[in-house]
Amino acid sequence: MSREHDGPSMALIVRKELQLSSGKIAVQCAHAAVSCALIAKKNEVRIMERWQANGARKICLEVEDLASIKSIMARAKSAGIITHLVKDAGHTEVAAGTITVLGIGPGPRNSIDALVSDLKPY
């Protein structure tokens, strides 16, 4: 197996039922990715370095609703994986405080894949 398939990964999980525009999804996923990367840079330096060295893999997936995001987040936290919930400022498509995206990682690819293997790509 090549190193690029073995390195850490990040998952960005979008709430499908919000029916966000593609631009809004892109920005919310960017918020999640940046926040997770900053947490990793501060608290998980080795994982962050491996993630960057192996191509900074990210996958974007969808869930049906907020309950699904909260469930995945709880499992990720239990596994010791970095998480970040994006709460919208409310200036455009959704009300202030609406949770739009969950970022998970960077973390061990097999651990993240196990958490999200049943989700569909967004």
Image (cartoon, rainbow, N blue to C red):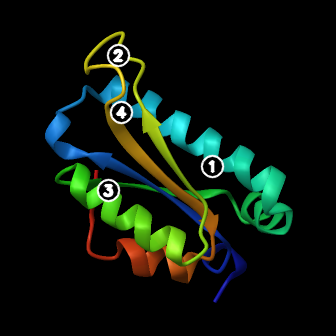
Can you identify the residue that label 4 sits on?
25
Seen as rendered, the residue at the extreme top is 91
Note whether 91 is above or below 110 in the view shown.
Answer: above
For marks 1 and 2 on the same chain, the one whose residue lies earlier in the sequence? 1
Mark 4 or 3: in front is 3
Can you identify the residue that label 2 sits on?
90
Contact, mark 3 vs mark 2 (Cβ under 8 Å): no
Can you identify the residue that label 3 sits on?
69
Residue 80: x, y in percent?
61, 73
Can you identify the residue that label 1 sits on?
36
Q: CA distance from mark 4 to mark 2?
A: 14 Å
Mark 1 or 4: in front is 1
Mark 4 or 2: in front is 2
For marks 4 and 3 on the same chain, the one whose residue lies earlier in the sequence? 4
Q: Secondary structure at mark 2?
A: loop
Other-residue count near label 4 (Cα within 10 Å), few / some / many at <14 / 14–19 / ≥20: many
Residue occupying image coordinates x 14% and y 42%: 17
Note whether 85 is above or below 97 in the view shown.
Answer: below
Residue 90: x, y in percent?
35, 16
- Is residue 2 found left or right of 100 in the rendered image? right
Residue type at the position of mark 2: Gly
Residue occupying image coordinates x 57% and y 76%: 109
Q: CA distance from mark 4 to mark 3?
A: 15 Å
Residue occupying image coordinates x 17% and y 53%: 64
Note whether 115 is above or below 29 in the view shown.
Answer: below
The answer to whether any part of residue 121 appears in the image is no
